Amino acid sequence: MTANTNTATSSSDTPNEITLLQPDDWHIHLRDGEALATTVAHAANSFNRVICMPNLVPPVKTASDAIAYRQRILDALTQADITKQRKDEFNPRMTLYFTDNTSATDIKNAAESGIVQAVKLYPAGATTNSADGVTDLKHCTQALEAMQKYGLPLLVHSEVTHAHVDIFDREKQFVDSTLGQIVRDYPELKIVVEHITTSDAADFVLAQGDNVAATITPQHLLFNRNHMLVGGIKPHFYCLPILKKATHQARLLEVATSGNRKFFLGTDSAPHATHKKENACGCAGCYSANIALPLYATAFDSVGKIDRLEGFASIFGAEFYGLPLNTSHITLHKQPMTIASSYPYMDGSTLTPLSAGETLPWSIKA
Ligand code: NCD
Ligand code: ZN
């Protein structure tokens, strides 16, 4: 199986090369400590701004936690084996982890820090390291009001956590039960529905004003649950929200390549050591940081829309966050690239990327 096994065919008049403004990644997990030696170089090779998720252990709860975490990322950057230009352009933007105790003062300090770009809401128990997340939105009123006031966006992991709800229905249920209510209660709040996986989430976002947007991962554009479950269970496709049916995949590909400014790049690259994924109780998360651009190019090209990649990857996210566009460029070309089977990772382990060992039709031009 190759990564470009979409039903749609590649258009014959697709260019063989495309130059984009340097992309940004609006949702990435870099982790901490030794992991940064692998993840920071990979992210910085492709992206200028990256929004760093706060689900560390312990989580990034305050502006001072975020400032300290950013410094650890920058320290790893100085050690990275990448060009000076990539080091100079890489700009980690930080997030706070929303808890039941996040206060209006925490939000004010974050907004004034100059480095906190958003606040991430994990419903408690929804995903990796979300145990300290929000148990009930009734605890969040003052913080959400402050975010609305300071223009600090809310990034939402949009899944309910009730044990009785089927894992494939958890995003739709959250959209139906909670997202609409947040938008009604905080009409000026900027909201990113993160890593959307269903047509229901896409349609919800389309129905809202300009203050509501969504990120989409490469795995949800390229794959569906059959890739994960047919012919043997493939743990490297397991992430949350979980891959859905092919019909949802097709709808995500449609909105991502539509040119609609509400949909932009967020890899959700989420490293877990190989042995923690190839496990009787495997961790959730797909690692894609260094191959994300060829993966997205493959997805866009699969529907003949490679010309729409630049808006999605390099323009719409910056516009949503009110940041200037990047000025440097990156070129992708139709030169096949075989993805590594693994990378060295922390504590002598390895890290297996999404589509390890597969060959993609697109690669980054040196
Ligand atoms: C992420 C992780 O590993 O931190 N995992 C995932 O499956 N996406 C957490 C998250 O974004 O849900
Ligand atoms: Zn994530």
Image (cartoon, grey):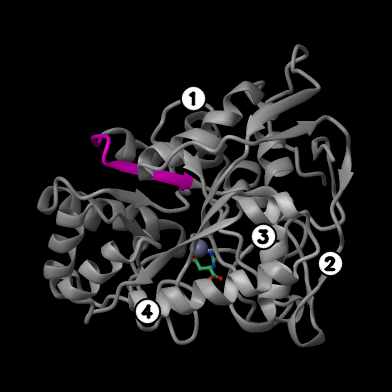
Q: Mark number for residue 64?
A: 4
Residue of label 3: 237
The amino acid type found where label 1 is placed reads: Ser
Residue 135 image point, x, y percent: 25, 78
> How many circles with numbers are drawn on the protein?
4
Label 4 packing within 10 angstroms: few (<14), some (14-19), many (20+): some
Q: Is residue 311 left or right of residue 353?
A: left
- Which residue, given by chain and number where applicable, does mark 2 sit on? 342
Whole-number angstrom distance, CA of label 3 to CA of label 2? 15 Å
- SS category of the residue bearing label 2: loop
In this rendered view, identify the residue nearer to me: 251 or 320: 320
Which one is in front, 63 or 154? 63
Front position among marks 4 and 3: 4
**Residue 132 screen position, x and y as percent:** 35, 83
**Amino acid beneath label 3:** Phe
What span is in magenta?
A: 208-215
**323 over 353 or under it: above or below:** above
- Whether tag 2 and tag 1 are in contact, CB under 8 A, the answer is no
Upstream in the sequence, badge 1 or badge 3? 3
Residue at point 81% right, 39% down?
363
Residue type marked 4: Ser
Give the Cα distance between marks 2 and 1: 33 Å
Disc 2 crowd, CA 10 A, few/some/many (<14, 14-19, 20+): some
Q: Nearer the viewer, mark 2 or mark 4?
A: 4
Which residue is identified by label 1? Answer: 258
Disc 1 residue: CB within 8 Å of ligand 2 = no
Foreground pick, 344 / 357: 344
